[in-house]
């Protein structure tokens, strides 16, 4: 099924947004548990930054599933997991991304000590994972003849 203009516009917009969020990994690299507990501003910033990436991932997945005329499940985790149906996306990457959907709920509902462990893991492993996802999305866009704002090979593919 060919992508319509709305699909193309939304995908490029969401991918550009996610790319900008990924650029901010360095802001949180050295964040400590003490920073997280004692500095409310930093805590809000890191939580919002993680939520932004997770929400963008869900939005991207919804657009792609709709455009490909595939079912869009009811839960965010299943929505992201369904991207693995498409050959453009590595199953391992999609499984790892869908795992992080839980963190969105943890950030909203759990206590600081529980949240910090998950946030630290996200900071440590998310950079490579999200770059792999962006690479796959941009390659997918090129395959669909949609021009991303930057080419797939412009992404940093190494660990941060």
Image: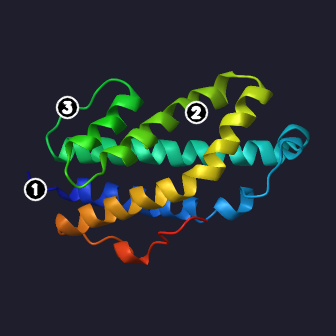
Q: Quadrant of the C terminus?
A: bottom right
Q: Choose mark 1 or mark 2, whichever is in front.
A: 2
Left/right placement of residue 7 relative to residue 58 reads left
**Residue depicted at 66% across the width and 22% down the height:** 109
How far apart are the alpha carbons under marks 3 and 1? 16 Å
Identify residue for label 2.
Answer: 103
Q: Is residue 58 above or below residue 158?
A: above
Q: Is residue 90 above or below residue 134?
A: above
Q: Position of residue 16 (x, y in %)?
A: 44, 64
Residue with the mark numbered 1: 2
Name the secondary structure under disc 1.
loop
Residue nearer the viewer, 6 or 24: 24
The residue located at (33%, 23%) in the rendering is 74
> SS for tag 2?
helix
Q: Earlier in the sequence, mark 1 or mark 2?
A: 1
Q: Position of residue 147 (x, y in %)?
A: 27, 72
**Residue for badge 3:** 71
């Amino acid at each position: 099924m060919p992508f319509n203009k709305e699909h193309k516009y939304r995908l490029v917009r969401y991918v550009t947004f996610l790319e900008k969020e990924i650029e901010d990994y360095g802001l949180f690299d050295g964040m400590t548990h003490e920073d997280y507990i004692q500095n409310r501003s930093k805590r809000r910033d890191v939580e919002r930054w993680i939520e932004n990436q997770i929400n963008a991932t869900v939005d991207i997945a919804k657009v792609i599933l709709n455009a490909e005329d595939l079912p869009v499940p009811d839960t965010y985790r299943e929505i992201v997991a369904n991207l693995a149906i498409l050959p453009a996306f590595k199953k391992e990457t999609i499984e790892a991304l869908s795992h992080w959907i839980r963190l969105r709920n943890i950030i909203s509902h759990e206590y600081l000590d529980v949240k910090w462990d998950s946030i630290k893991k996200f900071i440590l492993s998310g950079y490579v994972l999200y770059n792999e996802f962006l690479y796959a999305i941009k390659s997918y866009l090129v395959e669909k003849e949609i021009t991303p704002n930057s080419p797939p090979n412009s992404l940093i593919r190494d660990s941060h």
